[in-house]
Image (cartoon, rainbow, N blue to C red):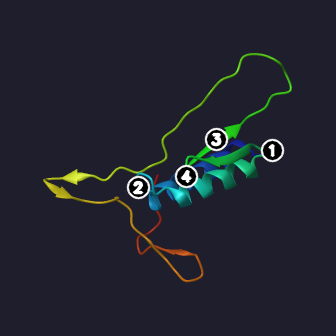
Amino acid sequence: MMQNHELLEWMTKLRRWSHRYPGLDFDEHETQEKLLEVLQSVDIEGRMIAGTAAIANIRSARPGKTITLRSEIDALVALVLGFLAGPIHSSSKTTDGQYTDSREEEKC
């Protein structure tokens, strides 16, 4: 089990990843893959649905009420002073599937 500081660091890296590689509406394939990878890493059953969405089943050993969590995973394109300004963070994918980003690591 992770310590508090490890959990915070892990969650911060996930947040930074999601901001660095935004998936626009109906094009969140990489976000969907990352979400399913993260769910699997913490032993939560997840699966793809609706093209670019995911659903997870969080099971409990105890009977009781069920809680549903829902979240949007698509990025929004910003309209800045009348100009279409695309996703705020940009990156490019190399031939080996890695991402490059010329900016320094984001500060929290």
Q: Quadrant of residue 66?
A: top right
Residue drawn 41% across the image and 55% down it: 24
Q: Position of residue 32 (x, y in %)?
A: 58, 53
Residue drawn 49% across the image and 47% down it: 73
Query: Which mark, residue 24?
Result: 2
Q: CA distance from mark 3 to mark 2?
A: 19 Å
Q: Which of pointers 3 and 2 lies earlier in the amino acid sequence?
A: 2
Q: CA distance from mark 2 to mark 4?
A: 13 Å
Q: Amino acid at mark 2?
A: Leu
Q: Amino acid at mark 1?
A: Met
Q: Residue furthest bottom?
A: 95
Q: CA distance from mark 2 to mark 1?
A: 34 Å
- SS at mark 1? loop
Callout 4: few (<14), some (14-19), or many (20+) C-alpha neighbours within 10 Å? few
Residue drawn 77% across the image and 16% down it: 64
Callout 3: few (<14), some (14-19), or many (20+) C-alpha neighbours within 10 Å? some
Q: CA distance from mark 1 to mark 4?
A: 33 Å
Callout 1: few (<14), some (14-19), or many (20+) C-alpha neighbours within 10 Å? few
Q: Nearer the viewer, mark 2 or mark 1?
A: 2
Question: Which residue is labeled 1 in the image?
Answer: 1
Q: Which of pointers 2 and 1 lies earlier in the amino acid sequence?
A: 1
Q: Determine contact: label 1, label 3, CB under 8 Å.
A: no
Q: Nearer the viewer, mark 1 or mark 4?
A: 4
- SS at mark 3? strand
Q: Which of pointers 1 and 3 lies earlier in the amino acid sequence?
A: 1
Q: Determine contact: label 3, label 4, CB under 8 Å.
A: no
Question: Which residue is labeled 3 in the image?
Answer: 55
Q: Which of pointers 2 and 4 lies earlier in the amino acid sequence?
A: 2
Q: Nearer the viewer, mark 1 or mark 3?
A: 3
Q: Position of residue 103 (x, y in %)?
A: 41, 70
Question: Which residue is labeled 4 in the image?
Answer: 51
